[in-house]
Image (tube, helix red, strand yellow):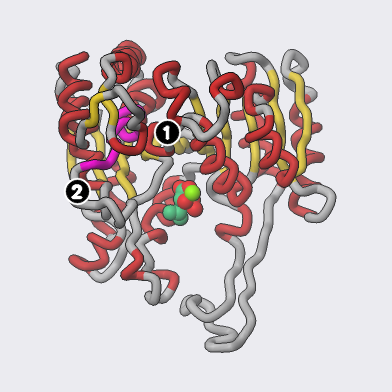
């Protein structure tokens, strides 16, 4: 089991260290190899996704990823920004299926900004298409040195596109996931305005015929954003494109109390996967030892389940996380009166003890 560990920037290094600690406490045999990515790689090698990092990622069974990005790179040309590292990994490895579960842990119902009765027992799965859409269309504009047709002009231009096969494969992923859950898929689009969305909707309807046991409904993205905070428990599996999925998964994360709790998995057709917390590099709290490592620890559990065929170990980690929450341990993002405030490393140590 070869794991490429790419901590990245900001709180990335702190939270990944805790996840590795937890993995090492399982008593399994892993081959763990580290590489720089994002701003850290740019500083050392002049590129956010150096050849060596990409090669390591391609050769691994799974990738454990922290986060990339920092405000100080905002003026760089687009191809050198830290975010290009994660986008490049997704593209090069074909990681088209992004799983972002939003589960509300019983102990954290009060950490959400929503009323407890709206979110108690919440368990939704957002499936975001990750290698198409406007993220990978043709850009033109001020920071797009790769194209440069309109350098320095006052026009910014991006292309939103999807092809039938790209939509078909994510549709299959969503319907198959729903078959193992409560058998409902909500496809989110903007078919009243966008051609890509019309194609998306038509293909979803076509593929749904192969899954007669699963109910499919459609929702426009603006309405979905509203329904997510109005009645989130009405959703089960949500499948959507790259851009809408980016936005809705951040929104869904807050239903659970903190984005610091949410893991994610990005899989390719071979089952190889990249596992990362849904949150970013949080440069404002980097280096303070207060970031919540649970999203990354739970991402490691997803890695064991989806890419390394170790479902029992995944269950053990998830049970350990529930246990530390039940013990009342909280990093500042999920802290509420009466609980015990802990830092990043203390939280990681507590999970190891609970294991
Ligand atoms: C995410 C992030 C990334 C995205 C950024 C860092 C490029 O927001 O994984 O959701 O937009 O996909
Ligand atoms: Mg995002």
Quadrant that contains the C terminus: top left
* Residue drawn 37% across the image and 39% down it: 276
Direction from residue 198 to residue 225 in the image, left or right: left
Crowd band around label 1 with a 10 angstrom C-alpha radius: few (<14), some (14–19), many (20+): many
Measured as percent of width and height from the top left, residue 11 is found at 26, 48
Would you name the residue on which mark 1 appears?
Answer: 262
**In terms of depth relative to the viewer, which is nearer, 174 or 235?**
235
In reply to whether residue 295 is colored magenta, the answer given is: yes
Quadrant that contains the N terminus: top left
Q: Is residue 114 at all visible to an observer of this figure?
A: yes
* Residue drawn 30% across the image and 44% down it: 66
Residue 234 quadrant: top right
Measured as percent of width and height from the top left, residue 121 is found at 54, 16
**In terms of depth relative to the viewer, which is nearer, 231 or 239?**
231
Q: Furthest residue to the front? A: 337
Q: Is mark 1 within 8 Å of ligand 1?
A: no
Would you name the residue on which mark 2 appears?
Answer: 288
* Residue drawn 41% across the image and 61% down it: 84
Instruction: Give the magenta-colored segment's residue range.
Output: 290-298
Measured as percent of width and height from the top left, residue 112 is found at 48, 31
Crowd band around label 2 with a 10 angstrom C-alpha radius: few (<14), some (14–19), many (20+): few
Q: Nearer the viewer's eye, disc 2 or disc 1?
A: 2
In reply to whether residue 41 is colored magenta, the answer given is: no
Direction from residue 192 to residue 49 in the image, left or right: left
Question: Label 1's element?
Answer: loop
Q: CA distance from mark 2 to mark 1?
A: 20 Å
Residue 187 quadrant: top right
Measured as percent of width and height from the top left, residue 111 is found at 43, 30
């Amino acid at each position: 089991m070869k794991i490429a560990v790419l901590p990245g920037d900001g709180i990335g290094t702190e939270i990944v260290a805790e996840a590795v600690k937890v993995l090492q406490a399982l008593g399994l045999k892993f081959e763990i190899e580290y590489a720089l990515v994002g701003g850290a790689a740019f500083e050392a090698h002049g590129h956010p996704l150096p050849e060596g990092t990409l090669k390591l990622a391609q050769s691994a069974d799974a990738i454990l990823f922290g986060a990339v990005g920092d405000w100080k790179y905002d003026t760089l040309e687009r191809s050198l920004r830290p975010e290009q590292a994660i986008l490049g990994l997704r593209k090069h490895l074909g990681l088209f299926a992004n799983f972002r579960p939003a589960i509300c842990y019983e102990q954290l119902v009060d950490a959400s900004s929503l009323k407890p009765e709206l979110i108690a027992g919440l368990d939704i799965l957002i499936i975001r298409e990750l290698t198409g859409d406007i993220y990978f269309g043709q850009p033109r504009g001020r920071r797009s040195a790769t194209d440069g047709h309109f350098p320095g002009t006052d026009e910014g231009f991006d292309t939103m596109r999807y092809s039938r096969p790209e939509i078909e494969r994510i549709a299959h992923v969503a319907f198959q996931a729903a078959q193992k859950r409560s058998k409902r898929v909500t496809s989110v689009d903007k078919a009243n305005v966008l051609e890509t969305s019309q194609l998306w909707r038509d293909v979803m309807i076509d593929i749904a015929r192969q899954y007669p046991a699963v109910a499919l409904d459609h929702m426009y993205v603006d309405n979905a954003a509203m329904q997510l905070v109005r009645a989130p428990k009405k959703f089960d599996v949500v499948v959507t494109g790259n851009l809408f999925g980016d936005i809705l998964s951040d929104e869904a994360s807050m239903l659970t109390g903190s984005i610091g709790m949410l893991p994610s998995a990005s899989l390719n057709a071979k089952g190889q996967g990249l596992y990362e917390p849904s949150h970013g590099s949080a440069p404002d709290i980097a280096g303070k030892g207060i970031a919540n490592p649970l999203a990354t620890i739970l991402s490691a559990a997803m890695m064991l389940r989806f890419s390394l065929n170790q479902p029992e170990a995944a269950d053990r980690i998830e049970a350990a996380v529930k246990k530390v929450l039940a013990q009342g341990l909280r990093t500042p993002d999920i802290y509420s009166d009466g609980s015990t405030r802990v830092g990043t490393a203390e939280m990681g140590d507590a999970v190891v003890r609970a294991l």
